[in-house]
Image (spheres, rainbow, N blue to C red):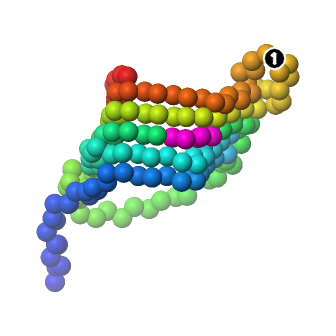
Amino acid sequence: KKKKKKAKTASKPFLLDIDAVYLTNVHFIKQDIPKGQLIDVLLPRGKILVDELLLDDNQFRLKEVELSRPIVRIAENERMPLPKEPKPTLIVLKEEQSDTKDSAKTKKPLQLELARLRLTNGIFYLDNYRKAPERVKPLDVVDFEHLALDEITLAIDSFAYSPDNYSG
């Protein structure tokens, strides 16, 4: 007997009805050892007021973003590529072909609209250990390989981003 295939149903959109997001002691770390990159962000306090989130369309419309005392650290270290391993031999068993147009979703480009951004008392560190393993310039000279900036304040009204264009 042949098994009957279940009829495919249209996927239902994933909806989020979010008005506000409050952030307290959020810590984000992205470490890419093969590329030698580290991004470390600590956000003691923040608030995001949402206008509209269209996840299926990759669109984010935000009324207001407030970030208080964010600390951002970026470090560029020596690259450590992963060792090359022999590729395994794959045997592919051919099955009935399915309609790939329905199963493969194309990702839509990010679109961000932000009515108001306020960042207060931010701190930013950049250490490029690839170019300069340690600080060699005097403290009264700007060392672009080892930056430390504090008391950063930023105010932006009406900002829009898409891969083809940004404005603000």
Residue drawn at point x = 22 percent, y = 57 percent: 13
132 sits to left or right of 9: right
The vertical placement of 95 against 69, above or below, is: below
Q: Residues within 10 Å of mark 1 (few under 14, many from 20)?
A: few
Q: Is residue 152 magenta?
A: no
Q: Quadrant of the image for the C terminus?
A: top left
Q: Quadrant of the image for the N terminus?
A: bottom left
> For numbered disc 1, what is the local secondary structure?
loop
Residue farthest top in this picture: 141
Q: Position of residue 39 (x, y in %)?
A: 62, 41
Q: Nearer the viewer, residue 33 or 13?
A: 13
35 sits to left or right of 159: right
Q: Is residue 70 magenta?
A: yes
Q: Main secondary structure of the magenta part?
A: strand
Magenta part of the protein: which range?
67-72
Q: Position of residue 138 (x, y in %)?
A: 85, 19
Query: Which residue type carries mark 1?
Result: Asp
Q: Position of residue 11 (x, y in %)?
A: 20, 60
Q: Write down the residue under mark 1.
A: 140
Residue drawn at point x = 34 percent, y = 32 percent: 115
Q: Position of residue 108 (x, y in %)?
A: 30, 41
